[in-house]
Image: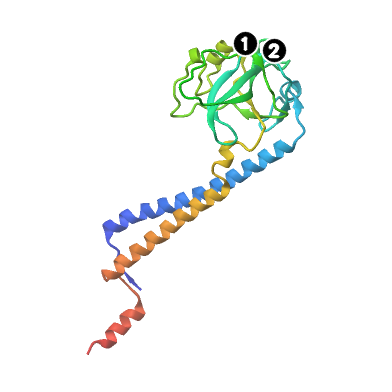
Amino acid sequence: MTFRPFPILTLIAIPVLAALVWLGVWQVQRAQWKTDLIRSFETAAAAEPATLDGAFCGQGGPRPDGVVKLSDTRGLQLRVFGHNTRGDAGYRLFQAVHPACIAPTGGVLAETGFEPIQLGEIQATAPATPAEFADKYIIEAWPDKPMMAAENAPDRNEWHWFDGPSMSAFLGAGALAEHYILAKLDGMPDHLTRTPPSGHIGYAVTWFGMAIAFLVIYALFHAQAGRLRFRKQAASEDQKKP
């Protein structure tokens, strides 16, 4: 085989091909990562819940993916923009609960419900109503601030990211423990169902397919220009010459 690559075209093709292959590998890794998250969630959902004090005040303290059972209580509710388990946009409602080991100086945010978005309606304050706690709650890490998050509006009880000091001041229930929150365990979370592992595999196949197509086009371009030849073809052409 004879191959004389175009220098500039090859310099452009190498990083493009590497990027396409990397994107495919990355999607395969994300599929495995998402599979592990789903398995962890399913294991946690099937676990026997601990009490609030048992989860937060026991030996070793709380652990991510631990399951907790809560009882009804009263208090102001925070409205934090997000999605429910069906993927609907709205406000997740959170209320402070108080494990014995950190009460009365602080609390932990627990999800109490979901408020669908109603255009044109602004709620100035949060009502002090009994929380309708679910049977189980899963302990999750305190959410990071999203890169493109809007500014919080405490005067309207409208939050777009978890700001511990401001939320503590709004609730008036002592400092919040900014390590964990308690998310309602009423179905697979939206971030796990929005793009399942099979979706990531589909993306990976697309990227790998684009890499193969790009490589084929690169080879055909050189073949048409006479810079890519195979020995058998070259030998047959020489035989035709007088």
Residue 193 coordinates in the image, percent (x, y): 58, 41
Say if mark 2 contacts mark 1, CB within 8 Å: yes
Quadrant containing the C terminus in the rendered view: bottom left
Q: Position of residue 50 (x, y in %)?
A: 76, 27
Of the residues shown, which amino acid type is indicated by label 2? Ala
The CA distance from mark 2 to mark 1 is 8 Å
The residue lying at 46 percent from left, 56 percent from top is 208
Residue 67 or residue 230, whichever sits in front: 67
Q: Residue at x 75, y 30 (%)?
A: 49
Residue that numbered label 2 is attached to: 103
Q: Secondary structure at mark 2?
A: loop
* Helix, strand or loop under label 1: loop
Q: Is residue 48 left or right of residue 187?
A: right
Query: For this rendering, which residue is in front, 198 or 120?
Result: 120
Q: Is residue 128 left or right of residue 147?
A: right
Q: Position of residue 3 (x, y in %)?
A: 32, 69
Residue 227 visible within the image: no
